Image: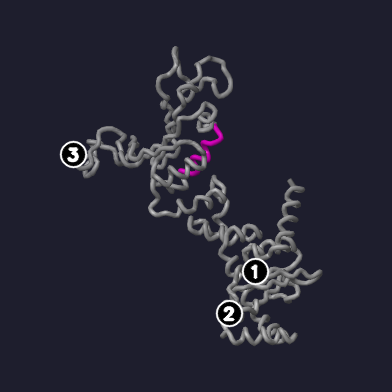
Amino acid sequence: MTNSGNLAGCEVEEKLRREPYSFDFFQAIRLLEKFRPERKSVGQFVHPAAEIAHFRAHPSLAFPASQIQDLEWPEDGPVRMLVNFMGLIGPEGVLPNPYTSLIIERQRDGDNTLRDFLDIFNHRIISLFYRAWRKYRVDVACERGERELFSRHLLSLLGLGTEGMRDRQTLSDESLIYYAGLLAQRPRSAQALQQILSDYFDVPVGIEQFSGGWYRLDPETQCRLSEENSDSGELGFGAVVGDEMWNQQSRVRIVIGPLTLERYADFLPDGQSFEPLRGWVRFFSNDEWDFELKLILEREQVPACTLGADGVSGPQLGWVSWVKSAPFQRDPGDTVLALESTKG
């Protein structure tokens, strides 16, 4: 792989030398930075002789056919790049055309004084233009190892921008950054959760809202007929028979499957995907709802219940324990697991 990469880099550099006009300006500078890593990038507060390139405006009134007119590769010193855009003179220069015409006439007589003087400003203007372009390109920043600033911005959208909040989740910060676009939405939707889980685990995912569940009442809220002046004992107002109540809107069911047996086992409480799934659910919901997990196994993957069997096909009561005498006609979805309980 290393030899192939070096060979490809040599071929690209050779083409850049032969046909600079066929390259985009920004891409050409990025390549020069790769080919000459010992030199400084353009636009910094360093001596111009230490930079990777020196920019000059092309003194011509002809229509520019490319962004780069020519490249000169001195043995030592910056590459000299003749460009057809921006600058003070040339086809897209900001000075009136007579300045370009004057420079062309002086060049015919071998006098480059005015052109060299204006190129001092051309170089700085074009250098800052490149740095402004690079500043807001995430791929370029990561390429140069400068991803920290952008990552901090994305983590700030998720409430994790300060150092004390970094790397404290069950999930890696890189995973949260990858889905920052969905996680930053307010309010967060069931569709966003479905897209995140389906993409992260690479499995079919469905979200069933308002699945409901029983919740235990605190002792002080339970109905006791012997108590006086208690809201819990007032008929039609707070009286509840029993120590539990049904809440339809506080529980969400995540349905995953149909799955192969091996993938099914990953989402069981002792599987490698169970804790990451709980981490996603907790971070996404901020503990506002309870979640439960329903796993669906492919009917062809249902194992025979054999006592003493080992591995993922071994019987586990409530998880992997189907008794069958014939192939299943449906995908079994009997396994329902609690992911997070916020209300006891």
Q: CA distance from mark 3 to mark 2?
A: 86 Å
Tag 2's secondary structure? loop
Q: Quadrant of the C terminus?
A: top left
Disc 1 vs disc 2: Cβ atoms closer than 8 Å? no
Residue 257 position within the rendered picture, expressed as x and y whole percent measured from the top left: 45, 32
Callout 1 amino acid: Ile
Q: Quadrant of the N terminus?
A: top right
Residue 95 position within the rendered picture, expressed as x and y whole percent measured from the top left: 57, 84
Q: CA distance from mark 1 to mark 2?
A: 15 Å
Q: Residue at left 46%, top 51%?
A: 183
Looking at the rendered image, the disc whose residue lies closer to the viewer, 3 or 2, is 2
Please tell me which residue lies in front, 34 or 269: 34
Q: CA distance from mark 1 to mark 3?
A: 86 Å
Q: Quadrant of residue 221?
A: top left
Q: Which residues are magenta?
A: 271-281
Q: Which disc number belongs to residue 93?
A: 2
Residue 310 position within the rendered picture, expressed as x and y whole percent measured from the top left: 58, 20
| Nearer-N-terminus badge (3/2) | 2
- Magenta stretch contains residue 118: no
**Res 344 seen here:** no
Which residue is identified by label 3?
Answer: 235
- Magenta stretch contains residue 279: yes
Q: Residues within 10 Å of mark 3 (few under 14, many from 20)?
A: few
Q: Describe residue 47's horizontal placement relative to residue 288 as left or right.
A: right
Which residue is identified by label 1?
Answer: 68
Residue extending furthest toward the top:
325
Callout 2 amino acid: Gly
Q: Residue at left 63%, top 61%?
A: 146
Asked if 241 appears above or below 13 in the picture, the reply is above
Looking at the rendered image, the disc whose residue lies closer to the viewer, 1 or 3, is 1
Q: What secondary structure predominates along the stretch shown in magenta?
A: helix
